Image (cartoon, helix red, strand yellow):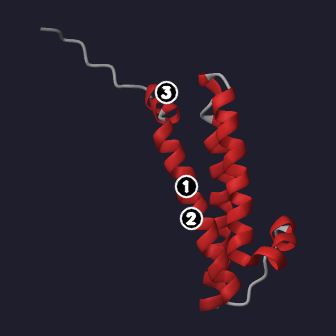
Amino acid sequence: MSHELPIPETPRPALTHAVSDEHVLWTVTMLAFVLDVLTTLYGLGRGLAELNPVVLALMPALGPVGALISLKLVVLAVAVVAWHVLPSRYRGAIPIGVAVPWGVAGLMNTQLILVTVFG
């Protein structure tokens, strides 16, 4: 028996585990993908404008859905190749680097839609 208090786990091991869990990171990336695509399509349907010049250039040929999905699939393909090429200790940066801008775009779309709908 000991009179010492247990040392609480520091956030670092928990963070390291979360960042190294590839399934979670790729799941978050795919959720950001869906959020961005759905909010963009909903916003376009409500009369809002697409600001991404690449998507705008692809829209006449592929339509909004095709342009969005095509561009995002190219980004995902590059991300997966980079993930396989990089040493394992750096791989977590790939899905994070894809998920953050997509997530931010989806949240900005959501905010714009809410402002447009509810004033």
**Whole-percent x and y of residue 18?**
47, 36
Q: Quadrant of residue 115?
A: bottom right
Quadrant (top left/top right/bottom left/bottom right) for the N terminus:
top left
Indicate left or right for 111 with 54 as reference. Answer: left
Amino acid type at image mark 1 = Met
Residue position marked by numbered label 2 in the rendering? 34
Q: How far apart, in angstroms, are the residues tagged by discs 3 and 2?
A: 30 Å
Q: Which mark is residue 30?
A: 1
- Quadrant showing the C terminus: bottom right
Q: Position of residue 26 (x, y in %)?
A: 53, 45
Closer to us: 112 or 38: 38
C-alpha gap between disc 1 and disc 3: 25 Å
Q: Residues within 10 Å of mark 3 (few under 14, many from 20)?
A: few
Is 51 displayed left or right of 66 in the figure? Answer: right
Q: Amino acid at mark 3?
A: Arg
* Residues at circles 1 and 2 in contact by the CB criterion of under 8 Å: yes
Tell me which label, 1 or 3, sits earlier in the chain.
3
- Residue 25: x %, y % from top left: 53, 43
Q: Which residue is mark 3?
A: 12
In the image, residue 18 sits, relative to residue 66, either above or below, namely above
Element type at marker 2?
helix
Q: Looking at the image, which residue is at 65% across and 22% down? A: 87
- Seen from this angle, which residue lies furthest front? 61
Whether the residues at callouts 1 and 3 have beta carbons within 8 Å, the answer is no
Q: Residue at x 33, y 19 (%)?
A: 7
